[in-house]
Amino acid sequence: MTSKLLIVGGGLFGSQAATYARARGIEATVFDAGLPGAASPAAAGLFKEAWAGRRFHEPFRQALPVLDQLYGIRKVQLRHDDDTAEEFLFVPPGTILAANPVRRRVTAIGDGWLEVDGQRHEGWVYVAAGVWCGAFSAGLQITGKAGASYVFPGERRGRIRSIARGRQALAFVRDAETTFFSDGTAEVDYADAHDQQTLAHAESLGLTGVPVQRLWGRRPYTRGGPLFRRLGERTWLATGGRKMGTIFGAAFARRLIDDEIRP
Ligand SMILES: Cc1cc2nc3c(=O)[nH]c(=O)nc-3n(C[C@H](O)[C@H](O)[C@H](O)COP(=O)(O)OP(=O)(O)OC[C@H]3O[C@@H](n4cnc5c(N)ncnc54)[C@H](O)[C@@H]3O)c2cc1C
């Protein structure tokens, strides 16, 4: 029987699963309700082996060929205050995110089906709904840690500054003709003061003036690390991308298609 993949969520997780599935000859449909607070549009799109560490070395290793095959991994150099350069791997979220998802909310799922606007669709189901995954799996606890990134007009030199342990302020050209800034803020209780602090960090890297865009999102955190779970014979769920959604989205897309569905 031929089947298609039905995906709940068009962020870094769902979009990579859709593109990987299509590359393996599987038809895929992405449903995304465009909910405010989605993490992926706010992401810088950077990753590096040191961020994954020993704990996440395996998913990192598995993600690289997926990202390279589907989108091409780029390199970007950011300069520290002493002018030394640090290199990062990079895939712009804009090249990953599903361009034309079905803009509808999925209201229910079961084994091998989902429901949209009261209508049932059948196929393999992949729930990739970020911090909203809890609505589809009883007892699943997800913590959203919010942060904002800002986009300034014009292309500036890439810069990076360490502002706390494991946290950096960075500015670089994520998308043409603009400079993207983020500072790693990850707060459960996000307030206006966090915005002010992020803008002050941006200013300290020379990004003054009025940003053209503010992107705010909640990164999904699951206890014990990122989560990939089989919910039924034909239904899976994945979330918990934390600060490395690009990598985990790719590793889980590969796992879903090559290890679970196996076309
Ligand atoms: C400021 C910032 C900077 C970041 N920088 C990086 C970085 O440099 N590198 C990196 O790897 N990661 C980074 N991240 C983390 C990364 O963004 C997340 O780990 C990742 O985006 C999570 O992806 P996701 O697809 O699981 O969730 P999301 O992006 O939140 O997507 C879930 C989607 O599901 C949809 N949805 C939910 N419920 C339903 C429903 N019932 N029906 C239909 N649609 C639904 C929502 O509309 C949403 O679009 C950053 C995050 C932030 C906030």
Image (tube, helix red, strand yellow):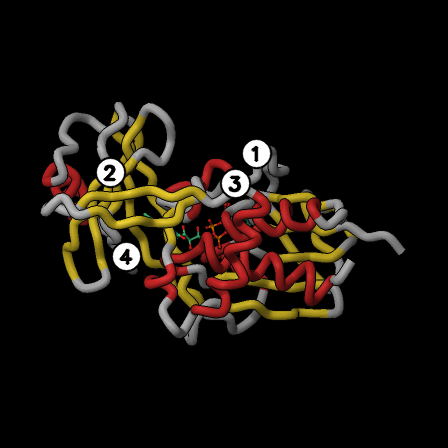
Structural crowding at the residue carrying mark 3, measured as other residues with C-alpha within 10 Å and reported as few (<14), some (14–19) or many (≥20):
many
* Residue 114 seen in the current view: yes
CA separation in Å, label 1 and label 4 = 27 Å
Q: In this view, does 173 lie to the left or right of 140?
A: left
Residue nearest the viewer, comparing 186 with 104: 186
Mark 2 or mark 3, which is nearer to you? 2
* N-terminal label among 2 and 3: 3
Q: The disc labelled 4 sits on which kind of residue?
A: Ala
Cβ–Cβ under 8 Å for marks 1 and 3: yes
Give the quarter of the figure containing the C terminus: bottom right
Q: Is mark 2 on a helix, strand or loop?
A: loop
Q: The disc labelled 2 sits on which kind of residue?
A: Gly
- Circle 4 residue: 186
- Circle 2 residue: 158
Q: The disc labelled 3 sits on which kind of residue?
A: Leu
Q: Which mark is residue 137?
A: none
CA separation in Å, label 4 and label 3 = 22 Å
* N-terminal label among 4 and 3: 3
- Circle 1 residue: 99
Q: Position of residue 3 (x, y in %)?
A: 81, 52
Q: Which residue lies furthest to the front in this view?
A: 84
* Number of numbered discs overlaid on the protein picture: 4
x 70%, y 54%: residue? 114
Q: In this view, does 145 lie to the left or right of 57?
A: left
Residue 213 lies in quadrant: top left
Q: Where is residue 176 in the image (x, y as percent from the top left)?
A: 37, 26
x 21%, y 53%: residue? 168
CA separation in Å, label 4 and label 2 = 22 Å
